[in-house]
Amino acid sequence: MKMKIALLGNPNCGKTTMFNAVTGSTQYVGNWPGVTVEKKEGPIRGHKDTLLVDLPGIYSLSPYTLEERITRSYLTNDKPDAVINIVDSTNIERSLYLTTELLEMNIPMIVALNMTDAAEKAGVSIDADKLSKSLGCRVIKTSASEGTGIEDLVKNTIDIASLKERPASYPRFSGCIEDTLEMISVAANKFSGDLPKRWLSVNLFSRDPILRQQLSLEDGLNEIEGLIKSCEESDDDDSESMIANERYTCIDGILKGTVIKGRTEGLSASDRIDVVLTNRLLGLPIFFMIMWSIYYISIQTLGDMTIGWTETLFGTISERVSALLSSANVAEWLHALIIDGAIAGVGAVLGFVPQLMILFLLISFLEDCGYMARVAFIMDRIFRQFGLSGKSFIPMLVGTGCSVPGIMASRTIENESDRRLTIMLTPFVPCGAKLPVFALFAGAFFPQQSWVAPSMYMIGIGMVILSGIILKKTDLFGGEPAPFVMELPSYRMPKIKGVLTHMWERSKAFIVKAGTVIFFAAGLIWFLQAFSWSLQMVRPDESILASIGSFIAPIFRPLGFGNWQSSVAVVTGFLAKEAVVSTYGVLLGVGEVLEDDPMLVSQISRIFTPVSAYAFMVFTLLAPPCFAALGAIRSEMRSWKWTFFAIAWQTGLAYMLSMLIYQFGGLFFEGKEVSEMATVIVGSLVLIAMGYSLYRIIKNSVSGKCACGGNCARCGAAKAGHSK
Ligand code: GDP
Ligand code: MG
C-alpha cells in the first residue's frame, strides 16, 4: 500500500508549486485562483512508496463549490495517510480558517507556512513554534518557489504519516455550542460510521446539506434539529454563522503573539499599480495594447529575424539526411518522401518555434506577475454586459497555449449553460498551433503592417463577445451571470525558472506534435500529392490529393481560397492546426517550384492575394479546432448535440466572417465588380437561413419539443408546443 498524502490549502497559496518541488514534476502553475481543477498525483522524489495528491484550492470545507466537493470527498472517502495544509504566510488569518476545519478531521496533518520569503519582505514575522503549540500539529516554514524548507517538510510529513500523529487538539467553541456539539455527537453516534466525530457534530450543527443526505438520519434528524434550534435561540444567531464567528475568534487567539506585523503603509504597491491597470476606462485599452505588443513583437518583429535562421538550419539538416540516404541507395521515391515530405513538412512547422517561444515567454511573464488575474476582472465588466462572468475568461486564458486544457478549465463554472457557452467560445482565442499560420501569412503578405498578427487576437476576443451577445439572447443560454468573486493575487516579480518552465511546457507540446503527428501527416501529404489514383508518380496537379482538393475547393471559392492546396490545408487543419503550415510546406516546396525560390513565404503568394490571405487567417482562427480539442469539447459537453452545435456555430461564424472579409476586401482593395458580390450575398442569406433552422432544430430538441412547429407526422401530434 502506498502512503497517500494530500496537499490542501486556499487557492493560489502555492500548492502546485509545492507539488512540483516535492515530486519533481511540472504541473501547471498560474498566479491566479482556479488553475488546478483536477487532482494531480505523483510520488515524492526519493520516496517511491508515497503518492502526493494536489487538490483544487478551497477556502473552506463546506460543500458549496465544485472544488470544495472534490476536496472534501477526497478527505472522507480516500482517507489520506497525512495532509499537508499549505498556509499562505502573507495571508495567514484567512488561511487558518481552513486549518481550523482540517484539525477536526482527525487526520495526521502538518502545516507548511509557505511564501515565507514574501512575508519576510512585507515585514511579517511568524513564530512557527508558538503556532505549532496552539494548533497542536507540526508547522514548517517553506518557500515552494525558492525551494527552501522542502526537505524538512517532506521528512516531517513522512514522520507523521508513519507515526499516525493526529492533531493534538481542535478548536473549542464557547457558549452553548460545546454542549450542543456533545449532545449531537451522542445522538448521531449510531449513524456516523467511521467519519471523524468532531467534524461530524460540527457539520451537523451547521446543517451541512451533503452530510445530512449521506447519513440518512431519519428520525435522528428531529432530535438534532431540536438541539440546534435551542442553541440558536439562546444566542440569537443561525448555527452556521455561529460556527464561523467562533472560528475567527479562535484564529485571533492563535495569532496573538504569534504573528508580528511590520510596517503597514496605506496603499500597497500592488494596489497602486491596480489603480491604473484595472481602471474602469483604461483597463481594457491597456490590455489590448499589451496583447498587441506581445503579438507584434513575437510574431512580426522577431519573427522576421528568426525565420531566416531556422530556414538555414533545416536546409543543412535536409542536405545531410539527403546525402546519407543517397549513400545508402534508398529508392528515389522513398528519398523524396523523407526529404520533400516529412522533413520539409516538419521543418516548416518547427521554423516557427522561436516565435512561439517568445510569445509563450511573454504570456508566462504576464501570468506569473499577476497581471492576467486582473484581466479576468477587466473582462468581467464586459462579459457581464451580455451575461457571462469573468470566470469564463480563465479557460480562454489557459487556451492561449492549447485549447484542450482551456476547455477543461471550464469545469469551475458552476452554471451549466454558462459553462457550455464558455466551452464553445474558448477555441476562438488563438492557441499556439494557430500562430504559425498567422506568422506565415503575415510575413508573406503584410511584412510592414504591424496590426495584422495582433488583429487575430482581437478578432478572436471580438468573436467571443459577439457570440456571447447573440447566444445569450437565445433561450439556450439565458440567465443572469453568477457573481464573480476572485481574489487578486499581489503583483510579484516572476521567478525566471518558473517563467521558463511555463514557456518550455507549452513549447514542448508543440515540438512533440511536430515530430510525431506532423511528421507522418507531411509524409502522407507528400505521398498523396506525388501519386495518381493508379499509383503512378505524377505532377502534383494530377495527383490524388489534387483531385480530392479540387472536389472540395468550390466550397471555399467565395472565401477567396478555392484552390486545391488550401482545401487540403483546411482539411489537414482539423487533424492539427500545425498541419496547415506543413501542408503548404510540402505542397508548395516541391518539384520545379523549388528552383525559382525555396522560401515558403514567397511561394505562398502564388495562390493568395493579401485579401484572400487575410480571409484564410480569419477562417483558421475561428473554424472548429483540431480533433483533440473537439474531443475535449465532446467530453466536457457530455452530449453530441451540444458538440455539433458548437462545431456548427464555429464553422458558420468562420465561414461568414471570412467571406465578408474576402468579398468586401476585394471590392475596396482589389477593384472587384459589385455584380460579382451579388451572388455571394444571396448565397450568404441562404446560409444564414439554414443556420437559423439548424438552431431551431437543436433548440427544440434540447428543450424536448419537436421542431415541426405543431403539425407533423413524426411526432404524431397537431398541437403547437407538443412534446416529442
Ligand atoms: P495553487 O493555486 O495553490 O496551486 O498555487 P500555485 O502553485 O499555482 O502558485 C501561485 C503563485 O504563487 C505562483 O505565481 C507561484 O509562483 C507563487 N508562489 C508559490 N509558492 C511561492 C513561495 O513560496 N514564495 C513566493 N514568493 N511565491 C510563491
Ligand atoms: Mg494549483
Image: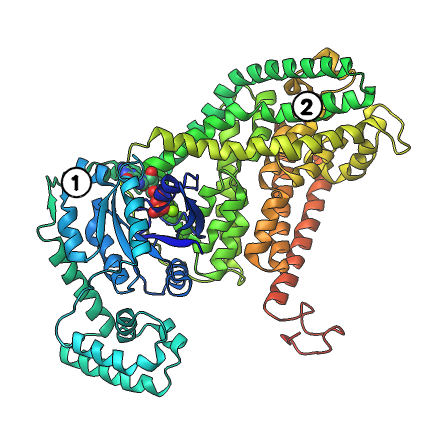
Judging by the rendered image, the residue that carries numbered circle 2 is 343
- Quarter of image, ligand 1: top left
Q: CA distance from mark 1 to mark 2?
A: 57 Å
Q: How is the image coloured?
A: rainbow
Judging by the rendered image, the residue that carries numbered circle 1 is 267
Expressed as whole percent of the image width and height from the top left, the position of residue 259 reads 12, 47
Residue closer to the observer: 379 or 539: 539
Going by the numbered disc 1, the residue's amino acid type is Leu
Going by the numbered disc 2, the residue's amino acid type is Ile
The residue that appears at 49% across and 42% down in the rendered structure is 399
Q: Quadrant of the C terminus?
A: bottom right
Expressed as whole percent of the image width and height from the top left, the position of residue 713 reads 76, 74
SS type, badge 2: helix
Asked if residue 118 is positioned above or below residue 695 in the image, the reply reads above
The residue that appears at 79% across and 29% down in the rendered structure is 527
Specify whether tag 1 is near ligand 1 (CB below 8 Å).
no
Residue closer to the observer: 272 or 612: 272
Classed neighbour count for the residue bearing mark 1: other residues with Cα under 10 Å, few (<14), some (14–19), many (≥20): few
Asked if residue 61 is positioned above or below residue 329 in the image, the reply reads below
Q: Is residue 491 visible?
A: no
Q: Is residue 132 visible?
A: yes
Expressed as whole percent of the image width and height from the top left, the position of residue 149 reads 26, 39
Asked if residue 313 is positioned above or below residue 169 in the image, the reply reads above
The residue that appears at 63% across and 20% down in the rendered structure is 601
Q: Is residue 198 left or right of residue 46?
A: left
Q: Quadrant of the N terminus?
A: bottom left
Q: Is residue 247 left or right of residue 278?
A: left
Q: Earlier in the sequence, mark 1 or mark 2?
A: 1
Furthest-front residue in this view: 163
Expressed as whole percent of the image width and height from the top left, the position of residue 21 reads 36, 39
Q: Quadrant of residue 69?
A: bottom left
